[in-house]
Structure formats: structure tokens, C-alpha cells
């Protein structure tokens, strides 16, 4: 009953309550940091579900990171007995992936398409450029990559790009060739995930009509950082391409113009004004009460951001008292800054902090650029303080991990040339650059993948290449009946990677990371629980779908939800293989380390990745001219204002205690720099600050280099040690071993209505989560969710 006051609304102020209970129409919540935007968004979903206005299958919520998606799911399932897997909660990329997996055929993609991360994309671009003898001096690969990404964000295919100069023409040609290469290899980049799903929704009336009807409510957090394509993607759920209204769903956007920090990557804060105009938004609510921080912290944030022009204008106040002053520290060197951090943390954890001992996970160290983390990591590592790094060189981006993933990707898709090239001669097996070039020529001439071109090669090089391909093909055979962990272990051994790193001087850490990969895969399988109740809906069968069954208090959540979960095909029950699902996860994952998620560790991250998060204690480090604000930003006003917003984000992460530090000298990118304190200190209110070191006139002059001064003193002491300390912890054991109800076992002959006859190779999971790997006579090996697929034993 809609009229009954819900206990969900009790912990909200009147404006928040009004926002949560708005009628089903488009709305914009514009409010400053810590005012409860995310809380309002989450509570609105819970409120719509609990009042019966919405079923879980009708929800789509967009968050900025996977971590935020997980948090939202966890919050929701603590508010309501609802199975969050049926809801579409995730990042734009995660949701587009899910959508394209469900409609791969219509999207004109191979079923097992793989995702290129930014690194892979760059090497794919380089490959195209090399093949066509493009001068890298004139057309740097990074620029080409940027150009392609920009076109996709503007929704432009090569044929749509306006060409004015010869250079334009060349760039567009490269874009076209890159697209052809991606299609041949069955891979998509991040921009493609968005653009391809947008085009499918735009061009396919039945699909669009279906999703417009299905998602009654679309809720978007951090709306100020959406780009042009993301905006168009949202719009297509509400409006048809001809401008007519869709099925009357409501878009609920929340954002803060003062926290727009991705303009450099194409975010358009103007999307907020466009949204109000184009969607004729009648409901705009401002939230002005900050619940996160004490007033010294909030005053600092307000004073700082007031130096920006052209703000939409919001106030932010708090009922909490002044709290502690904001502590400012000046260090002589970056090493000293790190030592000071360590000391302060010791006091905090021991109990000299706000309200007694502070948990490590409530302490965050923020920095402007990833390069700064190394010194801090080393200090923490040497002192044995557990810590966790978000962002940065993400776990899945480390070289050794990329190598292992390349082998795994080749098992799934032998035509993945990016992966082929990454490992064809790693570990070295006597295949030189010359042979590879010849192979590439042959493949181009034949219009096939490198893998397929190998059989035509001859001589010694041909023999070596043949041996490589044979190795991959044998591995594929050998791994067919194995669990994901076993597959990874086998591949690590037989690829020669482990042996290779064992022989390298610094190989130990790499081997540890490879072992961590096996653990990450295992915990991924544990968490994913494939096949459970969320099913890709065939168009027009919404009402009969299991997801519309709604709230089921007897259905406990199995385990932590995964935001990149892809449901099985509703018709055939076909599902991604655990390996394919894991590879997708690796490409989308924001570097969270699953295995150590529960450990009490200090949190290290860039200010960018701290968006939306909060901590009791926050250190903002490296506040120096040329670093924060960054060198590049200082020359133009827009750049400087974006840095100031970034600083606003940093300050407003703190609940109870905030430290701001800077260092007179810093070794960065191999150069010692002499620094002036950041101008942002002069924009903070003096009454809120406490100078731990005397407030100096910083000595002037801009940053200049002096060579690699004391670089040698900090080598060694591996980074990244702390967060994977519990690498060897054993995985949780399933509570009980139920008897299989499906009556299938390996070796059994079965019949599937679509795929025909086949043999069961293996079974994984229990009950509703059970999946079978079946080798079909006509259709090859497939993974099927047994709760959906109709498999009958053949006798
Ligand atoms: P940001 O702009 O940083 O993303 P936000 O506007 O999304 O911030 P939330 O993270 O939703 O803010 O809320 C900030 C903190 O205030 C959270 O700890 C939240 O639980 C708390 N909070 C929000 N509203 C209330 C309320 N009415 N009563 C008590 N606590 C609240
Ligand atoms: Mg938020």
C-alpha cells in the first residue's frame, strides 16, 4: 500500500523523503557532497519495490564503479529480502556488456566476444598502424586511440566522420581498419560496448520497445560525469529516435556539478541542463544538509569551491559541531611525508584518533597521480601495515597477468590476434619479429586470423609457429573437463610462464601474482553462482519471466552479488563458460582484489577513484603546485577549475579527521622536483586549519628537475605486498552437499531441443545454480544452466 508510511523513510530528512517518494516521472536531484544523494537513490529503489510499484526486473541503476554497484546491492539486500541479481545494477560498461551478451547475435558479435581494455586497445591500434606503414611520428598511436575513442563517444562510425584535411582522412581510414581488425578478432573495446548497445537500441524497434517497457525506473548516480554517448544511451530508453515518448518510464538522476571531474575524458556537466530541458523535468530537488563531515571539514570544502565560477549554486550545511581542525603538514621530502603518514596511522590505529582506535579500512590515503603511490606503498610494506591499492596499475593489468590471460583468451577464441601476438613468443620460443611479420602478411592476404594462417607457413619459423598453435590447441582439449582453477593452473604450468619467471631475478613477485590469479578465479566462481533466477528476457515475455516474481522472503541471497553477472539465455539456457565469464570480469573489473576484500587494510587510491566514497580519516598528500593542481591544468582556467573540483571531492571524503600534506621535494618520474605548496591552501579558511609544521612562505620558483637524486634508496621492498597477504586462505566450503536433482552426470548422452544430441562432459554448481558442460555432435561444447535448459537423457 503506497499510503502506509514505510520504515524505509524514517532515516531521511523531509527533502530526502520527498525525493525518494517522487511520482513516477523524470527527476533531477542536485546536491553537494555527503548530502545523501546515493542514499536517496538506493532508498528509492527499495521504496518502489516494497510498495509494490516495481519488481526487481524493472530496475536499472547506473553507478560509477563496480565497487559502488556492489555496495548498492549489499545495501538493498540489507533493507529488503530481495534478490538483487535480477536487477540491472552496474556501471555503464557492465550493463552494456550484459545487454550485448544477451543479444550478441542481433549486435552482430560472436557469442564469446572478448573485451579489450585500454592497454589492449592501444596495442591493437599500434598493430593496425604498423600493418599499413603509418608513420608513428606523424600519427602517434595514442592520438589515434584517442581519436577513435572520441568518435565513438560522439556516436560516429568511420563513414559519419567529417573529413576536412588529408590528416583527417588518414585518421578515419585507420579507424575503419581498426574496426575491421576488431571484427575479425571478435573483440570490442570499452567505447564499442556503449556504442554497439546504443545502436542496437536505436535501430531495433522491438528490442527498444521491450527494454523501454521493462525498465520502469532508471536511476543514475554521479550524473554530472556522464559523457555524450552515455546521455544518448539513457535517452533512448525514454524517447524513440523520432523524438516520440517511449513507454513512459522515469529517469531519476542524481549529481553534483561541483564534483564533475572527468571533463578531460569527455564528461559533459552540461548534460544536467540538457536533461532538465529535453526530458521536461518537473521535479528538481536540492539537498542541503551534509551528514558526512564535521563543520571544519565542510567549511574548508565550501570555501575552496567558492573560488570556481559558473556553478549551479547550492548550499551545504551541517548540524555536527566544528570537530577537529584540518591538519596541515609540510615534509622536507616525499620519503619523510610517507614516514609521517605511517606515524600518524600508528597513533590512529592504536587509539589516539577520533573516538578511540580507528580501523585501518577507515583510513584513506589519496593522491593526485598514481605515480605517487609507490613511495607510500613501500613505507607501508616495510612497516608491515596491511594496505590495499585501488586503481593504479590494476591487478589485471600487470604484465604477467596479461600474459596468463592471453593464453586463457586463446583457449576461448583462437582468432584473438591481440592475445596471439602477446604470447606467441613469450616465453621465448625462437619466433622472431621477421617471422611474425610474414605471418601477419599471410593472414592479411588470406583474410584470416594469425592462428589460422599458421598452417600455411613453412621452414623453421613455420615449425616453431606450428608448435605454438599445437600447444594452444592441446591445452584447449586438455582443459575441457576442468574447473576454472584447474584450467588456470594447467595453463600456468604448460605455457611455460611459471618456469620463465622462476628464471628471472624479480620473478618471485610475478609468480605470486599468478598464483593470486588462480585464487581470484576461484573466488569469482564462488561469488558468481551462475544461472540463478535472473534470465535474459526474450522480447515480450516479460510477464512470465522468473524475474517478475518479485520479492521472495524465503529466498536467501546466496553470497555477495556480482555487478558483472550475465544471465543465461532464456530460450536455450546457454550460459557463458566459467572461463569466458571470468575473462569478461577481468576486463571490466576495477582492480578490486576479491581474495582480500575482507581484510582490514589502509586504503590507497587516486582522488578520482575516491569519488562517492567516505572514510573516518583521510590524508590528501602531495598538495604541491604542478602536482595538485597538475602541471597541465595550470595554464587554463577550465583545467584549474576541474582541479579545484577534484580537491573538493578529496576534502569531502572525510568524516572525522582530515590531513593535508605537501613536500618540499619529490622524486617523480626519475627527477627530483622542488615544490611550492599548492595554491589551494590559500583558499581554505584559516580558522579551520591547524599547521602541524610552521606555516612557511614556500620557497619560490617553479618545479625543476635535478636528475634521479636518491632513487636507489627506495628500490626493492615490493609494492602490492600487503593486500594479498591472505592469498593462501582456503575458499569457503559450501554449507551442504545436496543430491543433484537434475539426474545428470558426466558421460551421459543427452538431447537439447535446439542443439540436438550431445554428451555431458561435466557438471558444476548445485540446485538452481547447476550448470552442465555438454559436447554437442553438431554444435560443439556449450555451457548450459540446468534450471533453464531442457536436457533430457537419451537412452
Ligand atoms: P557524494 O556526493 O560524496 O557521493 P552523497 O550525496 O551521495 O555524497 P551519501 O554517500 O549518500 O551522500 O551520504 C553521505 C553520508 O551521510 C552517508 O554515510 C549516509 O549514510 C549519511 N546520511 C545521508 N542521509 C542521512 C540522514 N538523513 N540521516 C543520517 N545520515 C544520513
Ligand atoms: Mg554519492
Image: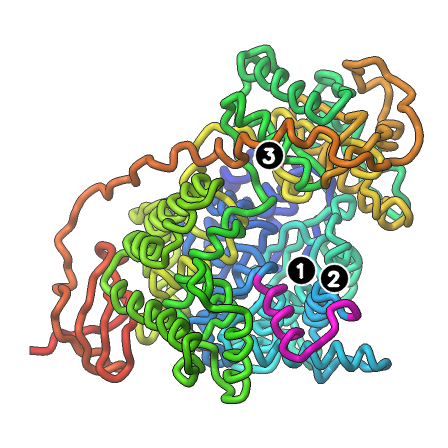
Chain part drawn in magenta: 120-138
State whether the magenta stretch is mostly helix, strand or loop: helix
Q: Which residue is mark 1?
A: 26
- The answer to the question of whether label 1 and label 2 lie on touching residues, with beta carbons closer than 8 A, is yes
Q: Nearer the viewer, residue 189 or 15?
A: 189
Using the image, determine if residue 41 lies above or below residue 146: above
Task: Please tell me which of labels 3 and 1 falls first in the chain.
Answer: 1
Can you name the residue that lies furthest to the front here?
Answer: 460
Q: Nearer the viewer, residue 15 or 272?
A: 272
Using the image, determine if residue 247 lies above or below residue 694: below
Q: Which residue is mark 3?
A: 604
Image spot of residue 705 (x, y percent):
83, 37
Q: Which residue is mark 2?
A: 275
- The answer to the question of whether label 2 and label 3 lie on touching residues, with beta carbons closer than 8 A, is no
Residue 561: assigned label: none
Using the image, determine if residue 33 lies above or below residue 200: above
Residue 530 vs residue 694: left or right?
left
To which quarter of the image does residue 295 belong? top right
Q: Nearer the viewer, residue 238 or 93?
A: 93
How many numbered callouts? 3
**In the structure shown, which secondary structural element does the residue marked by tag 1 occupy?**
loop
**In the structure shown, which secondary structural element does the residue marked by tag 3 occupy?**
strand
Image spot of residue 283 (x, y percent):
72, 54
Q: Is residue 130 magenta?
A: yes
Quadrant occupied by the C terminus: bottom left
Task: Please tell me which of labels 2 and 3 falls first in the chain.
Answer: 2
Measure how far apart labels 1 and 2 are at the Cα level: 9 Å
Q: Is mark 3 within 8 Å of ligand 1?
A: no
Measure how far apart labels 3 and 1 are at the Cα level: 37 Å
Amino acid at each position: 500500500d503506497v499510503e502506509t508510511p514505510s520504515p524505509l523513510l524514517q532515516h531521511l530528512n523531509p527533502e530526502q523523503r520527498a525525493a525518494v517518494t517522487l511520482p513516477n516521472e523524470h527527476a533531477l536531484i542536485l546536491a553537494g557532497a555527503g548530502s545523501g544523494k546515493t542514499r536517496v537513490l538506493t532508498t528509492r529503489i527499495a521504496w518502489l519495490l516494497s510498495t509494490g510499484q516495481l519488481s526487481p526486473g524493472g530496475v536499472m541503476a547506473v553507478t560509477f564503479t563496480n565497487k559502488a554497484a556492489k555496495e548498492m546491492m549489499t545495501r538493498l539486500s540489507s533493507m529488503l529480502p530481495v534478490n538483487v541479481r535480477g536487477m540491472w545494477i552496474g556501471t555503464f560498461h557492465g550493463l552494456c556488456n550484459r545487454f550485448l551478451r544477451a543479444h550478441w547475435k542481433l549486435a552482430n558479435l560472436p557469442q564469446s566476444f572478448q573485451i579489450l581494455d585500454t592497454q589492449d586497445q592501444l596495442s591493437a591500434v599500434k598493430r593496425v598502424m604498423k600493418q599499413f606503414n603509418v608513420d608513428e611520428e606523424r600519427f602517434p598511436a595514442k592520438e589515434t586511440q584517442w581519436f577513435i575513442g572520441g568518435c565513438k563517444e560522439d556516436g560516429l562510425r568511420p563513414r559519419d566522420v567529417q573529413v576536412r584535411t588529408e590528416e583527417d582522412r588518414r585518421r578515419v581510414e585507420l579507424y575503419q581498419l581498426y574496426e575491421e581488425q576488431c571484427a575479425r578478432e571478435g573483440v570490442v573495446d570499452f567505447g564499442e560496448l556503449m556504442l554497439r548497445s546504443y545502436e542496437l537500441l536505436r535501430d531495433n524497434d522491438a528490442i527498444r520497445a521491450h527494454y523501454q517497457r521493462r525498465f520502469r525506473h532508471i536511476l543514475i548516480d554521479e550524473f554530472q560525469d556522464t559523457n555524450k554517448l552515455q546521455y544518448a544511451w539513457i535517452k533512448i530508453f525514454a524517447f524513440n529516435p523520432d523524438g516520440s515518448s517511449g513507454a513512459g518510464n522515469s529517469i531519476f538522476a542524481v549529481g553534483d556539478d561541483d564534483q564533475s571531474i572527468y571533463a578531460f575524458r569527455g564528461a559533459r556537466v552540461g548534460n544536467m541542463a540538457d536533461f532538465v530541458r529535453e526530458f521536461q523535468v518537473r521535479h528538481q530537488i536540492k539537498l542541503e544538509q551534509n551528514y558526512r563531515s564535521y563543520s571544519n571539514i565542510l567549511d574548508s570544502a565550501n570555501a575552496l569551491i567558492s573560488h570556481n565560477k559558473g556553478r549551479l549554486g547550492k548550499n551545504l550545511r551541517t548540524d555536527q559541531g566544528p570537530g577537529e581542525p584540518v591538519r596541515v603538514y609540510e615534509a622536507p621530502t616525499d620519503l619523510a611525508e610517507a614516514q609521517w603518514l605511517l606515524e600518524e596511522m600508528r597513533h590512529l590505529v592504536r587509539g589516539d584518533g577520533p573516538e578511540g582506535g580507528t580501523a585501518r579500512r577507515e583510513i584513506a590515503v589519496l593522491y593526485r597521480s598514481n605515480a605517487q603511490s609507490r613511495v607510500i606503498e613501500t613505507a607501508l610494506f616495510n612497516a608491515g601495515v596491511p594496505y590495499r591499492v585501488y586503481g593504479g596499475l590494476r591487478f589485471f593489468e600487470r604484465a604477467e597477468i596479461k600474459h596468463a590471460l592471453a593464453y586463457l583468451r586463446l583457449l576461448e577464441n583462437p582468432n584473438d590476434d591481440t592475445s596471439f601476438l602477446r604470447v606467441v613468443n613469450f616465453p621465448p620460443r625462437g619466433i622472431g619479429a621477421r617471422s611474425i611479420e610474414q605471418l601477419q602478411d599471410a593472414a592479411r592476404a588470406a583474410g584470416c586470423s594469425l592462428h589460422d594462417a599458421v598452417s600455411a607457413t613453412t621452414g623453421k619459423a613455420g615449425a616453431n609457429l606450428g608448435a605454438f598453435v599445437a600447444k594452444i590447441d592441446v591445452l584447449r582439449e586438455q582443459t575441457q573437463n576442468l574447473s576454472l582453477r584447474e584450467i588456470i593452473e594447467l595453463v600456468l604450468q604448460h605455457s611455460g610462464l611459471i618456469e620463465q619467471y622462476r628464471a628471472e631475478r624479480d620473478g618471485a613477485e610475478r609468480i605470486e601474482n599468478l598464483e593470486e590469479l588462480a585464487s581470484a578465479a576461484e573466488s569469482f566462481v564462488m561469488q558468481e553462482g551462475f544461472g540463478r533466477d535472473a534470465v535474459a528476457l526474450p522480447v515480450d515475455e516479460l510477464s512470465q519471466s522468473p524475474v517478475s516474481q518479485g520479492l521472495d522472503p524465503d529466498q536467501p541471497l546466496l553470497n555477495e552479488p556480482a555487478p558483472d553477472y550475465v544471465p543465461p539465455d532464456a530460450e536455450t539456457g546457454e550460459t557463458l563458460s566459467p572461463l569466458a565469464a571470468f575473462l569478461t570480469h577481468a576486463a571490466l573489473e576495477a582492480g578490486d582484489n576479491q581474495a582480500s576484500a575482507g581484510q582490514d587494510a589502509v586504503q590507497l587510491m587516486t582522488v578520482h577513484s575516491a569519488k562517492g566514497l567516505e572514510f573516518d580519516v583521510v590524508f590528501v598528500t602531495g598538495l604541491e603546485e604542478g602536482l595538485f593542481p597538475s602541471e597541465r591544468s595550470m595554464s587554463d582556467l577550465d583545467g584549474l577549475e576541474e582541479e579545484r573540483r577534484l580537491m573538493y571531492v578529496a576534502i569531502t571524503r572525510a568524516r572525522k579527521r582530515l590531513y593535508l600534506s605537501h613536500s618540499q621535494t619529490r622524486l617523480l618520474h626519475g627527477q627530483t622536483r622542488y615544490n611550492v605548496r599548492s595554491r589551494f591552501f590559500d583558499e581554505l579558511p584559516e580558522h579551520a586549519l591547524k599547521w602541524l609544521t610552521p606555516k612557511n612562505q614556500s620557497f619560490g620558483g617553479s618545479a625543476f628537475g635535478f636528475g634521479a637524486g636518491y632513487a636507489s634508496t627506495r628500490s626493492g621492498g615490493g609494492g602490492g605486498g600487503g593486500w594479498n597477504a591472505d592469498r593462501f586462505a582456503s575458499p569457503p566450503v559450501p554449507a551442504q552437499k545436496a543430491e543433484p536433482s537434475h539426474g545428470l552426470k558426466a558421460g551421459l548422452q543427452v538431447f537439447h531441443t535446439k542443439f540436438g544430441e550431445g554428451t555431458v562432459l561435466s557438471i558444476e554448481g548445485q540446485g538452481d545454480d547447476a550448470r552442465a558442460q555438454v559436447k554437442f555432435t553438431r554444435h560443439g561444447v556449450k555451457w548450459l544452466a540446468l534450471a533453464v535448459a531442457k536436457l533430457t537423457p537419451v537412452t
